[in-house]
Amino acid sequence: MKFQASTLVAAAMLGSAFATAIAAGSPPRFYNIIEGTPLDFAGKEESDAVKTFKQTGLNPYNDRKEKIVEGESLFSTACSGCHGHHAEGKLGPGLADDYWTYPANATDPGLFSSIYGGLQGMMGPQSGHLSQDEILVIMSWIRSVYKGDPAKALWKQAN
């Protein structure tokens, strides 16, 4: 229990750091949500969208209908087995509401870091399965199905 509590505190601090960096206009830093170590992007291909995202912390695919449709397809094959077909939760947590097991996921850099670097339990790093661009595409679909309080949608407030 002690490890789990300290992990949640660390995740909340990272989420706050992501939000502060974006608000200050500085590029976000991408860390493993559990370990706090920087993510390794060495040798990874970066699309223009990924480069923009890494500078701004804003997913350029959010609200782009064609990317959201593509993201639904990718989510169905890569994520729905654990998170449900509608991101309602299954073995893994739901992703369409206000509750985030890891508070950093309320921001796009945090969600990207969670998917890319993995989390505790069964959520392993997806960096070997999905490209960085595909992760952004999946994130655009996840954000499009959000049913929570708009005031808690930190990825929208950064715009």
Image (tube, grey):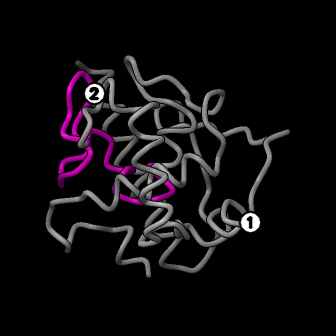
Q: Position of residue 108 (x, y in %)?
A: 46, 59
Residue 54 in the image: x percent, y percent?
Answer: 66, 62
Q: Describe residue 133's horizontal placement relative to residue 82 as left or right.
A: right
Q: Which residue is mark 1?
A: 48
Answer with left or right where residue 4 lies relative to residue 141: left
Is the residue 36 above or below the residue 149 in the image?
Answer: above
Q: Can you say which quadrant of the picture contains the C terminus?
A: bottom left
Residue ID for mark 2: 92
Q: Residue at x 47, y 71 (%)?
A: 64
Residues rendered magenta in the picture: 87-111
Which residue type does callout 2 highlight? Gly
Residue 49 is situated, as x and y percent measured from the top left of the image, at 66, 65
Q: Which residue is found at the position 74% from the left and 66% from the top?
A: 48
Q: Quadrant of residue 52?
A: bottom right
At x 73% / y 38%, what residue is drawn? 40
Q: Nearer the viewer, mark 1 or mark 2?
A: 1
The answer to which of 54 and 3 lies nearer the viewer is: 54
Residue type of the residue flagged with mark 1: Asp
Magenta part, dominant SS: loop
| Residue 106 highlighted magenta (yes or no) | yes
Residues 90 and 17: in front is 90
Q: Earlier in the sequence, mark 1 or mark 2?
A: 1
Q: Most extreme residue toward the right, as rendered? A: 43
